[in-house]
Amino acid sequence: MFVSRVVTMVVGIVLATVPTSPTIRAATARSWQLSNTDTFATGTLTGTEVDEEGRLRIAPRFRTLWGPAEGIVWAVAMADNGGAFVALSGPGRLVHVSASGAATTWYEDGEDGLVTAVVPDGSGGVYFGVSGSTGRVMQATAPETIRLIAETGSQFVWSLLREESGKLWAATGGPGKIMTRLPGERWETVFSSGDDPVRCLAALGDGNIVAGTGLEGRILRIGPDGRAFVLLEAAQDEIVALAPAPSGRLYALATGSPARRGPSRTNAGTDSAKRATTTVRVTASSDSDPSDEARPSGESQRPPARPGRVGGALYRLDPDGGVWTIWETKTEIPFAVAVDASGFPVVATGNRGRIIRMNPDGQATRILRFPSDSPSALASDSDGRLWVGGTTDARLAAIGPELEDEAIYRSAPLDTGTLAVWGRIRWDADVPKGARLVVRLRSGNTKKPDETWSDWVEVETGAVGGEGNVGAPNARKLQLELELVASNKGASPRVRSLEVFYQPHNRPPQNRAARHRSAGRGLGPRAETEHEWTRAAGGRRSRRTQDHELDDVGTRRDASDPQSLRARGTDVLVDRQGSRRR
């Protein structure tokens, strides 16, 4: 009886020293950061962009001038009056879109033709290519004022180019050829590639023309004498677009299946520091895996489907002969490349509608989202405006150069893995005079944000700018929203980083497994019991082995726990949380 009272008294004392409410000392404080191009790019860029320094800011103004409409955009070319011409299929037609967005159909094919190429004629009209049963080059000088320029003898007219002298070039497929003619003269075939279609053309400005092929992945230089010289055999099998820069550099966008051969990387006349290849800075995730579709030996059956194939690269060809891979993707569909007013390359990709501006080393300086999942055609004008054609829903949009008045950025939801207690949020941003930055958060427990999530809670900074309480209810997931408002002078807030502090909710560890082994060593029978514990916060597992002695009747005595008491042949254990176990 005396021993029982002692045991009860001691257990009561230990329990009294243990806090009656759970503490969070076992849970480690954590933080969630958005602080660079990669982390910002995981969110939804609605009217926002990530600049060359990895800062989030308001993007150039985006205006949909025409569409969405039926069809697929193959090419876009600038018109003399500030508008643009759009080449489409499904049905095949040529549409003129004015700067105000008024659309006029200049040509519509009565059969199954596709308008696949377009280039201004220098006098207010346009040359365009029609692909189908017979590839034709045609000229439109006004709506429905059309004349035939040439029947190419090929099935597809993939690209047209006009030099300032008026010399016209055409690239064809099925069979592949490069054709040219001076005004008033006959057409001449200067290069034949057979089953390898010639997909794109560009002028270098030194009298040379470059062309990209769609089966062997070659970039060719055509000299004034008509002689072809291979500049690059790419690792991919299709060169889809070429864009020369004022610096003399050439950017080549490749897509398709990897070839067995690798690109030549000669770089004569440059120092060793320049030889380092810049790796990709940003890629987009995709719900589908990259596919290596089989390519036909020729293009006699049909044109390549749009959207195109997943995976590709952007090459930079320098005037000294150096060739560099400055951007690669395994998850995006490369469609088009253009050079903006600053001489930087801009790449349009599907299947998530991204427009990526890079510096010449491939570092992303701008990332925009296009409403169409596949921006398939690009053109730039002298005012710094970028014109974009969409594929999944035919449209024409103009981007920049002025900024949007305001924009919204939403992060991808943070999943803490367990119930979280939200703390403070801090951010580092430049907010010009007259501009405004609003930070909001919401929380929830479903896989994707829905109506069951909390309302958006605006962070009140009080006297201390750049930080405040999260304010959202405790939950497993958290989402961030930023509202950026430009000043009257068009200056945007620039957000360098944000950091949210939180603690996983502390719950007692759970004993998931116990294994008992008889040791049979020492002065008497002994046993080991191994416990495996799982802590709810973060799911971290740990093990603990307890060594016990067994008395003459097999009753366990704990050989290590100082809080163990033996009474009447029974062990009474008090753990660190004050719980009693037998």
Image (cartoon, grey):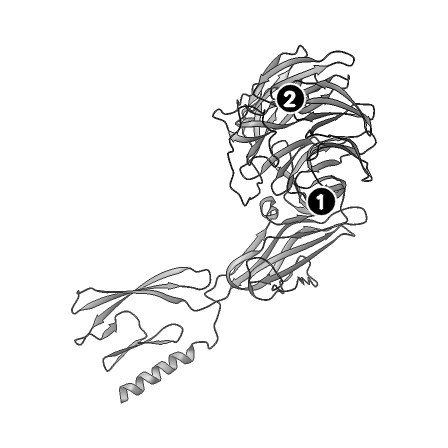
Would you identify the image quadrant in which residue 393 lies? top right
- Please tell me whether residue 9 is drawn above or below residue 298 in the rendered image: below
Q: Looking at the picture, which amino acid does disc 2 mark?
A: Thr
Residue at the extreme bottom of the image, as rendered: 1
Residue 220 located left or right of residue 122: left
Say if 124 sits above or below 399 in the image.
above
> Would residue 298 be seen by someone viewing this image from the given angle?
yes
Q: Quadrant of the C terminus?
A: bottom left
> So how many labels did they put on this image?
2
Q: Amino acid at mark 1?
A: Ala
Q: Which residue is mark 2?
A: 172
Q: Nearer the viewer, residue 39 or 429?
A: 39
The percent coordinates of residue 356 (x first, y second) are 64, 38
Q: Residue at x 81, y 33 (%)?
A: 82
Earlier residue among tags 2 and 1: 1
Nearer to us of marks 2 and 1 is 2
Q: Which residue is mark 1?
A: 59
Task: Report the residue at 60% width, 41% height from top.
Answer: 351
Query: How many neighbours does mark 2 have within 10 angstroms: few (below 14), some (14-19), or many (20 or more)?
Result: many
Task: Give the quadrant of the N terminus.
Answer: bottom left
Mark pair 2, 1: CA separation: 38 Å
Crowdedness near tag 1: few (<14), some (14–19) or many (≥20) residues, C-alpha within 10 Å: many
Q: Position of residue 26 (x, y in %)?
A: 45, 65
- The picture places residue 118, in percent across and down from the top left corner, at 73, 27
